[in-house]
Image (spheres, rainbow, N blue to C red):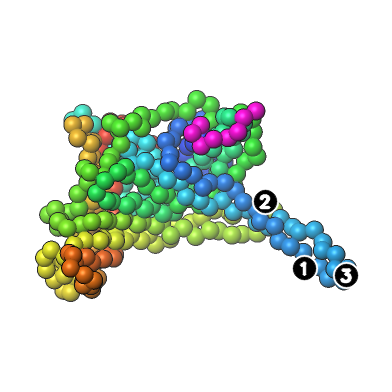
């Protein structure tokens, strides 16, 4: 028996047919950066009086299983997280690849089970009833691109000595499959914007826990609410164009895009209707003027508030 180490940790993901029921097969071995998944059940101290100063036993309270996973933004495995966030979609063949367009606003979003394994111990447990609540991706000048995905789960199975995921499908998460920050660009109304130092896209399904009274202490489900999307921009003050659009109240189209050079693999996050706030331009010294813009997305007529378009060599995420 050894000590569990992050270097050997495993995450196997499969979509559920019935909410809260871990599938028997269909698991994918997912690359990840970190995971906060796992059920918790807090202790509540006794409120019993009349027995002097002798405290009585505490009780176990309800079960919660909320946590973030940080995953690489790559051209293959990331599509499964996009399906969990936005629901299934029909791909389009395009030359030597496929175009997958994930759109916000689906009436129902899927649930999944994720097994976390520590083969050093060995110990395996499956987090079930997982729905994706939030997505955040930070864009900057250099480094890897990672996505933080906030999950709300129903529960977790007891630790077992063997995996229940069978033989999961593995993905190639090496350099030639991952998107990197130096390939990124920000476009406003289809024109590349200069002076952007950092951009952070945030999306939420605004899940509401269905906290009915149940003997298991677990939630019954989590229902999607009205989705939201926002974009934070840190940029140098280089021209008046953005400020004029902000003060006029005119919505703009904003696109964040990355590519894998030479592989014809791309990722685009499109916000077709974004409102810019009026922002101050503080002068704090002799260097360039830097400003922060926190924009808010809306839904265009007959369209979607947000679309994530992934072009890769995966035929389907069904």
Q: Looking at the figure, which quarter contains the C terminus?
A: top left
Which residue is at a point 28% across and 65% down the rendered structure image? 294
In this rendering, would 269 be left or right of 227? left
Residue annotated with mark 3: 52
For mark 1, give the secondary structure: loop
Q: Position of residue 65 (x, y in %)?
A: 56, 51
Pointer 2 with pointer 3, Cβ within 8 A: no
Picture layout, residue 201 above or below residue 284 = above
Which residue is at a point 23% across and 66% down the rendered structure image? 291
- Is residue 229 visible in the rendered structure shown here? yes
Q: Position of residue 8 (x, y in %)?
A: 51, 31
Residue annotated with mark 1: 47
Q: Residues within 10 Å of mark 2 (few under 14, many from 20)?
A: few
Task: Give the overall secondary structure of the magenta segment.
Answer: loop
Q: Which image quadrant is residue 73 in?
A: top left
Q: Position of residue 222 (x, y in %)?
A: 51, 55
Distance (Cα) linking label 2 and label 1: 22 Å
For mark 3, give the secondary structure: loop
Q: How many marks are shown on the rendered structure?
A: 3
Picture layout, residue 190 above or below residue 179 = below
Label 1 or label 3, whichever comes before in sequence order: 1
Label 2 or label 1, whichever comes before in sequence order: 1
Which residue is at a point 71% across and 55% down the rendered structure image? 60
The residue range painted magenta reads: 1-8
Residue annotated with mark 2: 216
Picture layout, residue 213 above or below residue 113 = below
């Amino acid at each position: 028996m050894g000590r569990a180490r992050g270097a050997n940790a495993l995450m196997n993901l499969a979509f559920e047919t019935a909410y809260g029921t871990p599938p028997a097969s269909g698991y994918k071995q997912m690359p990840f950066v970190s995971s906060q998944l796992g059920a918790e059940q807090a202790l509540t101290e006794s409120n019993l009086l009349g027995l002097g100063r002798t405290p009585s036993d505490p009780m176990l309270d309800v079960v919660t299983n909320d946590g973030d996973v940080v995953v690489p933004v790559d051209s293959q495995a990331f599509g499964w997280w996009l399906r969990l966030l936005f629901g299934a979609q029909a791909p389009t063949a395009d030359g030597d690849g496929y175009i997958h367009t994930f759109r916000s606003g689906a009436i129902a979003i899927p649930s999944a089970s994720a097994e976390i394994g520590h083969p050093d111990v060995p110990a395996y447990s499956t987090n079930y009833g997982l729905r994706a609540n939030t997505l955040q991706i930070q864009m900057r000048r250099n480094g890897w691109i990672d996505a933080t995905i906030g999950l709300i789960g129903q529960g977790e199975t007891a630790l077992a000595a063997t995996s229940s995921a069978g033989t999961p499908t593995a993905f190639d998460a090496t350099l030639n499959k991952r998107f990197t920050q130096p390939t990124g660009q920000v476009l406003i109304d289809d024109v590349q914007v200069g002076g952007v130092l950092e951009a952070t896209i945030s999306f939420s399904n605004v899940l509401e826990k269905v906290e009915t009274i149940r003997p298991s202490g677990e939630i019954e489900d989590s229902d999607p609410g009205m989705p939201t999307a926002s974009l934070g921009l840190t940029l140098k003050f280089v021209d008046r164009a953005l400020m004029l659009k902000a003060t006029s109240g005119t919505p703009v189209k904003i696109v964040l895009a990355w590519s894998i050079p030479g592989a014809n693999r791309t990722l685009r996050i499109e916000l077709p209707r974004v409102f810019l706030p009026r922002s101050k331009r503080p002068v704090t010294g002799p260097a360039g003027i830097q400003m922060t813009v926190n924009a808010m997305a809306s839904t265009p007529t007959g369209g979607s508030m947000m679309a994530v378009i992934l072009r890769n060599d995966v035929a389907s995420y069904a």
